[in-house]
Image (cartoon, grey):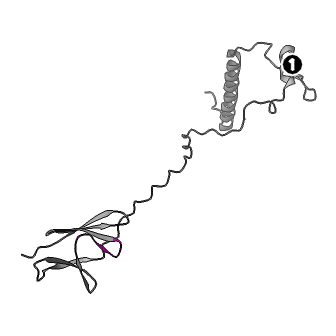
Amino acid sequence: MPALPSRRQGLWLAALLTVALCGWTAWREQDSQPWSTEDAIPRRHADTTVSPEQVIGTSEAGGLLDRDPLVGSETDLFRSISFQSSAPRALAPPPPPPPQKPSAPTFPYQYFGRMVDVDGRTITYLARGDTLIPIHARQLLDNTFRIDAVTETQIVVTYVPLEEKIVIAVQTGN
């Protein structure tokens, strides 16, 4: 009966097979690539330098030696590229809103009531604080409010500086 290899011998055998398979695979890949002898770079000793004419044909080497690859570049080699949409351009700020149209201030008087005088005329009263003021049509109050009409249901007042009408509802006492 043949003797079984020792463990150490088995490991050496596995390592040897691995190296052989790696070398064989590399050799097959090298043979499968279409290399020509013109493309191959000749191997030299480390102390000798290889000129571009030896690596590339003489006619091709002239164009490479004439330009500096970084100085004569037309494009920015280190520019950043973003795939985000560009930010919208800053637009001119919108024009300020037009000033609000001035409006009449609140009417400082309140309807107080009506009274029929001795002659049979109806007199309408407005109150401002503790003061009662009798009113009639075409009367001017405080030089800013004009009484336009006094009827049974309403009093129409105009704010004179803006010609804005104010209607005051009147309650009838039946």
User: Could you tell me residue 37's position as x and y percent?
Assistant: 79, 13
Q: Is residue 24 above or below residue 145?
A: above
Q: Secondary structure beneath disc 1?
A: helix
Q: Is residue 128 part of the magenta span, yes or no?
A: no
Where are the magenta residues, as a range? 136-144
Q: Is residue 144 left or right of residue 93?
A: left
Query: Is residue 31 shown left or right of residue 117?
Result: right
Residue 129 lies in quadrant: bottom left
What's the magenta bit mostly, secondary-structure-wise? loop
Q: Name the residue that disc number 1 marks.
A: 62
| Magenta-span inclusion, residue 143 | yes
Identify whether 55 is placed above or below 147. Answer: above
Return the x and y of residue 144 as percentages of the image width and height: 35, 71
Instruction: Give the image location of residue 138, x and y in percent.
Output: 26, 69
Is 122 in front, or is 159?
122
Q: Position of residue 134 (x, y in %)?
A: 22, 79
